[in-house]
Image (cartoon, grey):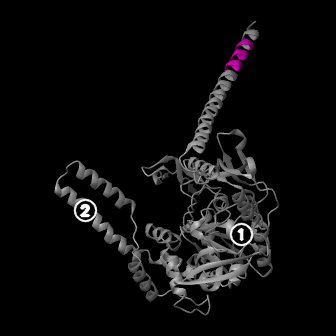
């Protein structure tokens, strides 16, 4: 009798649970259906009755992207052209001119040309402003630059561009552009193998393995893996690259979501290449996503020492979802966690400030975790290196210089006024830095700190509320002092700014390969990495 009662209660409980779940689903379903109907009728009325002729495709594109902008910057809608561009980036090759461009209102600025590819062969240089493509003014073109610059193999394209105020033109032939995951590796003088991993495309692990084996064959007894500036890419390749140095069966990352099917654990699946060779991984503020998975797993499992500056802090995982007519939604589905259990996501997109910007996790809100050997590591703000270097960091003024393209534009000017013979002997001197500061004065460079913004808002509020002149003067005096401190920052942050200026200038003359050749002789992060690897007691001491 008692058993039957328990069974009845269980059946009733299950029925209620199913009813509540079904009701919740129906509520969501009908709410979605309701909003879709509202939008459909609005879109129809707008396009049929608006006073001027409308472009339904452009309106829909704008509506979708505006909606997704309220979530996070990684959840994106891709039209057919965008889908193809994403595929090319993942595959590591595409048909185009072989250059990176920055889209401006009336021009496309060449940011970098790849050595021996069409743009380079045609004589295009960083800083050139493309104002017309195939006779079509860029100012009249509002879509993605790749729609015009990329195209069928061996097809020709005529570009009109501005260089130092002079109008020029060139005709080039599009070709296959191959983007190497490992653009450079070399054996250094102390038997340290140096490997640059610049992207996590399909070739990331095969190219890294090849580089490691070649270096070991030449006598490498220790390795530096450089992930600076690596924006990430394929999660599978992050696992495979970690697997090169870690045993089979090691947990590399865990993904967690409110959707049960996206909760997964990712383990190394293959036999490693070398689990014993001493390893240093270099990262900076532009190392993100897959780079952080690799750096985080190496750190959490105490497999190597991390050097540089705190990484970007992207702990969100995206997955493409196929939509109608060849379009696609790249959707954030989960957060990833390192082996110790930390999520290194730095920005909280669920909380926004008055300007609508995501709130950065505060230092006091970081949580402590432990590595395999019991070392303390923290979540909430990217991967913090075991050894941090000032030259790797991006301060407020450095970020402002990058955002305003001041460093890029000065390097362009420098290129046309100086000659360099070799990347291995270049030194950005004190005189060069003075010239840079003079350039900033003539270019009206300025930036606003967070403290200035808060004080200005407080000053406006104080004035509105009728505070005394003494208090208002105190606010104004503080703002003046901050302005003075900002100017002094150019000298205080000279080391990190000089590093970026050096990088940008060398790339102008000797491409990316020349920059790495300079790195292995002059770069502070590589020098520090070599010093750590040379001192075995220091190396093991950091990890223990």
Q: Position of residue 11 (x, y in %)?
A: 73, 16
Mark 2 in CB contact with mark 1 (< 8 angstroms)? no
Q: Position of residue 357 (x, y in %)?
A: 48, 53
Q: Position of residue 183 (x, y in %)?
A: 71, 75
Q: Quadrant of the C terminus?
A: bottom right
Q: Quadrant of residue 107?
A: bottom right
Left or right: 308 in relation to 432: right
What's the magenta region? 7-16
Q: Nearer the viewer, residue 321 or 318?
A: 321
Left or right: 208 in relation to 503: right
Q: Name the mark nearer the viewer: 2 or 1.
A: 1
Please tell me whether residue 11 belongs to the stretch shown in magenta: yes
Using the numbered discs, state the Cα–Cα distance from disc 2 to disc 1 in whole angstroms. 52 Å
Left or right: 428 in relation to 455: right
Could you say whether the residue bearing mark 1 is in a helix, strand or loop?
loop
Q: Position of residue 543 (x, y in %)?
A: 62, 64
Q: Which residue is mark 1?
A: 150
Could you say whether the residue bearing mark 2 is in a helix, strand or loop?
helix
Q: Nearer the viewer, residue 138 or 48?
A: 48
As drawn, the residue found furthest toward the right would be: 271
Q: Nearer the viewer, residue 177 or 45?
A: 45
Q: Nearer the viewer, residue 171 or 304?
A: 171
Q: Earlier in the sequence, mark 2 or mark 1?
A: 1
Q: Which residue is mark 2?
A: 476
Q: Residue at x 25, y 59 (%)?
A: 475
As drawn, the residue found furthest toward the top would be: 1
Q: Decide: few, some or many residues near mark 2? Use Cα within 10 Å; few <14, some 14-19, many ≥20.
A: some
Q: Decide: few, some or many residues near mark 1? Use Cα within 10 Å; few <14, some 14-19, many ≥20.
A: some
């Amino acid at each position: 009798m008692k058993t039957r009662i328990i069974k009845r209660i269980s059946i009733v409980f299950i029925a209620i649970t199913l009813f509540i779940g079904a009701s919740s689903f129906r509520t969501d379903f009908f709410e979605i259906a309701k909003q879709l109907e509202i939008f459909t009728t609005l879109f129809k009325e707008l396009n049929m009755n608006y006073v001027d002729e409308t472009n339904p495709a452009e309106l829909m594109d704008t509506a979708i992207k505006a909606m997704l902008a309220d979530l996070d910057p990684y959840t994106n809608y891709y039209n057919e052209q965008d889908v193809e561009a994403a595929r090319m980036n993942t595959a590591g090759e595409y048909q185009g001119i072989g250059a990176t461009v920055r889209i401006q209102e009336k021009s496309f600025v060449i940011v970098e040309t790849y050595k021996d590819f069409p743009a380079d062969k045609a004589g295009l240089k960083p800083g050139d402003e493309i104002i017309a493509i195939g006779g079509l003014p860029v100012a009249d073109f509002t879509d993605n630059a790749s729609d015009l610059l990329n195209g069928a193999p061996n097809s020709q394209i005529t570009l009109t561009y501005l260089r130092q105020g002079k109008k020029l033109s060139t005709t080039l032939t599009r070709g296959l552009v191959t983007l190497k995951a490992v653009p450079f590796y070399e054996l250094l003088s102390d038997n340290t193998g140096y490997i640059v991993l610049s992207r996590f495309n399909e070739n990331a692990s095969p190219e890294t393995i090849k580089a490691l084996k070649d270096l070991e064959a030449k006598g490498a007894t220790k390795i530096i893996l450089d992930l600076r500036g690596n924006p990430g890419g394929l999660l599978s390749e992050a696992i495979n690259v970690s697997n090169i140095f870690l045993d089979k069966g090691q947990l590399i990352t865990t993904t967690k979501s409110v959707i049960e099917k996206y909760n997964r654990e990712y383990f190394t699946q293959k036999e490693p290449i070398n689990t014993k060779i001493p390893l240093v991984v270099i990262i900076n503020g532009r190392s993100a996503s897959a780079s952080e998975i690799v750096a985080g797993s190496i750190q959490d499992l105490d497999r190597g020492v991390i050097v540089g500056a705190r990484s970007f802090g992207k702990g969100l995982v995206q997955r493409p979802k196929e939509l109608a007519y060849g379009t696609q939604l790249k959707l954030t589905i989960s957060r990833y966690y390192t082996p110790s259990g930390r999520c290194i996501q730095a920005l909280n997109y669920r909380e926004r400030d008055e300007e609508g910007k995501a709130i950065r996790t505060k230092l006091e809100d970081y949580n402590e975790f432990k590595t395999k050997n019991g070392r303390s590591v923290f979540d909430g703000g990217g991967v913090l290196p075991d050894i941090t270097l000032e030259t790797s960091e991006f301060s407020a003024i450095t970020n402002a210089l990058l955002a305003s393209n001041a460093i890029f534009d000065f390097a362009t000017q420098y290129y046309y006024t100086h000659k360099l013979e070799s990347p291995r002997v270049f030194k950005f001197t004190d005189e060069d830095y003075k010239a840079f500061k003079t350039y900033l004065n003539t270019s009206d460079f300025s930036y606003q700190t967070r403290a200035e913004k808060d004080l200005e808002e407080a000053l406006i509020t104080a004035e509105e509320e009728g505070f005394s002149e003494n208090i208002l003067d105190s606010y104004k005096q503080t703002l003046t002092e901050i302005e003075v401190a900002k100017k002094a920052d150019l000298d205080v942050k000279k080391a990190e700014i000089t590093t970026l200026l050096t990088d940008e200038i060398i790339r102008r003359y000797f491409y990316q390969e020349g920059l790495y050749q300079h790195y292995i002789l002059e770069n502070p992060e590589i020098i520090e990495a070599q010093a750590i690897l040379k001192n075995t007691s220091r190396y093991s001491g950091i990890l223990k």
